[in-house]
Amino acid sequence: MKKKIISALLSAALVVTSFSSITAMAASDTIGGTTYQQKSFTANKITHPENGLKAPDGIVDYIGNSTVTDEITGVGDRAQNYAWSAIGYGDWVYIGTCPNAMTQTLNFMGTILGNKFDKEIMTATLNAMFNGAFFTAEEDGGDPKGILVKVNTKTGEVKLLMSKATTNTNVQFRNVVELNGKFYFCGSVNGLPTVYQVDPATDEYKKVYQSIDQADFYKAYQMGISVGIRGISTFENKLIISLVGLEGAYICESDNPEDPDSFKVIATMSDMFNYPAYRYQDSIYGGSIWDMAAYNGSLYVSICTGTPENKPDDNTMQSFALIKGDRDDNGKWTWTSVIGDKEKNNAKYTYGIDPERTRSGAANLCVYDGYLYIGEYNDEEIALERVLFDQSCDFMNSNLEQSVNLYRMDENEEIQLVVGDADEMFPDGGLTGLGSGFDRNENQYIWRMQVYNNKLYVGTFDTSSLLEPIGQLTNGDLLKMTDEEWQSQIEYIKVLAELILNKYKTPQLPVAAPATLSISRDDARNMAKSVNNAGKISRATAANAENVIELAQEIENTANEKASEEFIATYTELSKASKNMTISIGEIIGKIFTEENIAKMTSFVKCAAYMSTAERGFDIFTLDSNLNVKTVTTNGFGDPYNHGCRTFAVTDDNLIVGTANPFYGTQIWTLSDNKYDLNEDSKVDVQDVTFAQCVVAGTEEKPADFYERADYNKDGKVDINDITAYQIYLAENNN
C-alpha cells in the first residue's frame, strides 16, 4: 500500500541524491575549544567541554539499556535534545530536558494528525538528508526519556535528580518559576500534566499537582485535545498555572502549592473570550495558553488562537491574542481583551497586534525597564509538516518573509515596535532601526528573553539549521564536505534507496539498482560552484553507468526567486525526458516531476533563495534601556546544530544558556560580558591597556591557582602579543 508520505520521501531522496545534503561536521572543528568569544561577550560550554562543538552532549551520559548517568566520561546523550526549563541557585543550575524532541513531533504528525508514514523509511530519509547528524534513536534502541538534573556552573559537576531508570519518572518539565524559596516545575511526568516542587536547599522533590488522570488523558488524546501545563508564573505571592482539560483551557492559582486542594480556577474558556486553540490540529499543536507575566499590577496572558476553522487562508493561521487579568481585594478576577477580536471583544489591537502581521501563532513575554516586551513566535510546526508531507515550502516561505518582530507595551497599553520592518501601522519601522528577525529572515521565534545585568537578552530559534538540506544548494556548504563526509552521505542514500525499492518494488524498479549508486564528490562541488558563482547548475550525474540520468538542461539562476519560470521549464523538460527511462531513478523522477508538482518546485526555489544568505545556529542579542543593540552570537556559539536558544537562567555569577539541539543533544553555556572589548581575533587591543599592565602581564609568572585559565608560552610567561582579557585582569591585580 502506497502511503501519503512516500511522495515526500521520494522527493527527499531525489534532492539528496542529486544535490547531497547537510554535512556532518567533525567534532574537532571547534571555536576556541569550548569557548565562544567575540568583542563584548564570552561564552563557555560547561557540559561535556572536552567534546567541543558539533559532538555528543545532552548534559548526562548514556550507558545503554535506556539508562543515563551523571558519572560523566564524555559519551553524552544525544537524546536529551532541549534544555526545556532552567533556573539558577547559587553556583548551580537546575534543568529539565525534552528528549528526542523532533521524533516526538513526527510521532504526533503520524498519529493524531493523520500523516501516516513508514518509520524505517522516515529514519533512513532523515539520515540521508542530514548525513546521519539528525538524532532519531539510541544505537541500542533504548529510550532514556527526559530528566531533571543540576549542573555546577563553576566545576561542571552533574547531579541527576530524576530519570526513568533511576526514579521511575519520565520527566518532561518545560517551565519553572521560584516561589517562597521553592522551585515549581511544570510539564509532564510519566505522561501526565503535573507540577513538581523542588527544594534547592535539599534537592528534595515531590508532586504537588496533577491536572488530569490517566483515563481522562487518554480520552482527551482520542478527542485530539492537547492537554498539558505550559504557562507558569507568580502573581501577588501566588503560583499561577495554565492547563487544558476535556472542556478546554483554564488558569488556576494557588497560595499554598503544596496542597493540591488549594488550586482554584480563575479563568475558563469563556473568561478568556474562547481564544485558546487547544487541539493538536490547531496552531503550534494546540499551544493554547502560551505565556504569562505579571506587569503593572495585572496578569498578562498570551494565547494561541489559530484553528482550521478560523484560519484566513490555507497558508495562514490566526495570530496570537493577549488578555489581562485583574484581581480585586475579594479575590475575584476580571479579564480584558488587549490583543484579539476588536469588534466582538473590544480588544485594543487586532490578533497579532499589526493587521499586516499574519505569521505568529504565539508570543513570549518579559518585563524590562518598565515595559512588557512581546516577542513573536511563528508557527513553524505547520510549516515543517507541509515541507515534509506535502513537499511544499509555501507556508515556510510566508514565515521567512515575515520573520519575527519584537514589541514593547507601556503602562497605558500603548505598543511600540522595537525590532521589525516598517509597514502601515509602524511606518518608521523598529525603534532600534533593525528589521524583522533582527535583519535575519531565518529567525522564526523569539524563543526566550531574560533580564540580566540591567540588559534584556533575547534568544532566537533559527530555522536554517533544520532547512540545511535545502539551504546547502545555495549557501556553499557543499563545497566544505570532506571525502569521508561525502562517502558517508552516499552510504545513507544507498540505505534509503534500498528500503524504498524493497518495500515498494515493482518489475520496473529492480531492487539491485541502488547497490551500484555512486556520486562523485567533484560532481557535487562543481554543481555547488555553479550555484554560488554563476547562479546556475549546468550538469550533475545522479547515477553510474547502469543507472545514468543526464541532468543536461540548464537550471537558470537557482538561487534567484525571480527565476522560477526558467527553473520550472527546465524540470518540465526533465520530467518529459525521464518518462522514457526504465531504470529505477528515472522512474522515480518521472513520477515526482509532474505538472502537479510545479508549484512545489517554485516554493522550493524560493526557500533555497532565503537560505542562501542564512547563517545556521541561534542568535542572541542584548538591548539596554536606550535600546542600543549588541550581538552576542548569530551562529549558536559556533555550532550550527544549536538551532535554538531554548532557555536562560541566572546564577550568582553568570547568565546560563541552554540550547535546543536535535542533532547532538542540548548544551549548557555560561555567558558573561567582557570587561574589555575584544577584536575580531578575540584578543584585547594592546592600545586599550597601559604600558605598565603590559609589562606586568609579560613578566609575571603564572599564579598557581589560575594555571588552567591563563595562556602561557613554553617559558611560563604571558606573551605580550597574546594578551587576553583574563591576563589583563591578572596584571591589574598584580598577581
Image: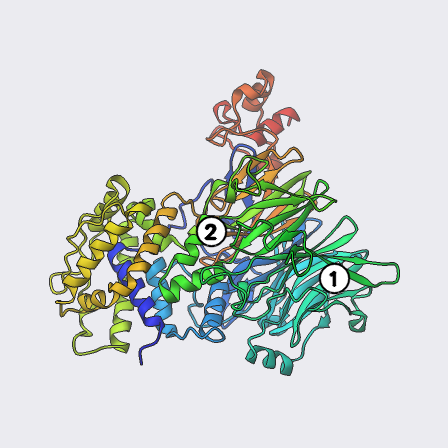
Question: Vertically, is 637 above or below 660?
Answer: above
- In the figure, residue 431 lies in which quadrant? top right
Q: For the residue labelled by badge 1, is the local secondary structure a helix, a strand or a loop?
A: strand
Image position, residue 413 (x, y; %): 71, 47
Q: Nearer the viewer, residue 536 or 637?
A: 536
Q: Which mark is residue 51?
A: 2
- Residue 205, visible in the rendered structure: yes
Determine whether label 2 and label 1 are within 8 Å by CB: no
Residue at 65% across / 58% down in the picture?
A: 343
Q: Nearer the viewer, mark 2 or mark 1?
A: 1
Residue at 49% from the left image edge and 32% from the top image edge: 682
**Horizontal relation, residue 40 to residue 640: left or right:** right
In the rendering, at what x and y percent does residue 194 appear? Answer: 67, 70
Q: Amino acid at mark 1?
A: Ile
Circle 1 is placed at which residue position? 240
Q: Considering only order in the chain, which callout, 1 or 2, is on the residue closer to the N terminus?
A: 2
Disc 2/disc 1 C-alpha distance (Å):
40 Å
Q: Is residue 580 left or right of residue 719?
A: left
* Residue at the image point whose x is 24% and y is 74% from the top: 501
Relative image position of residue 383 (x, y in whole percent) = 45, 60
Estimate how packed mark 1 is, as few (under 14), some (14 to 19) or many (20 or more) residues with alpha carbons within 10 Å: many
680 is higher (above) or lower (below) than 636: above
Quadrant that contains the C terminus: top right
Mark linked to residue 141: none
Q: Is the N terminus in the top left, top right, bottom left or bottom right quadrant?
A: bottom left
Between 142 and 111, which is closer to the camera in this rendering? 111
Q: What amino acid is labelled 2 in the image?
A: Asn
Q: Quadrant of residue 475?
A: top left
Toward the viewer: 717 or 210?
A: 210
State the SS at label 2. helix
Q: Position of residue 171 (x, y in %)?
A: 61, 68
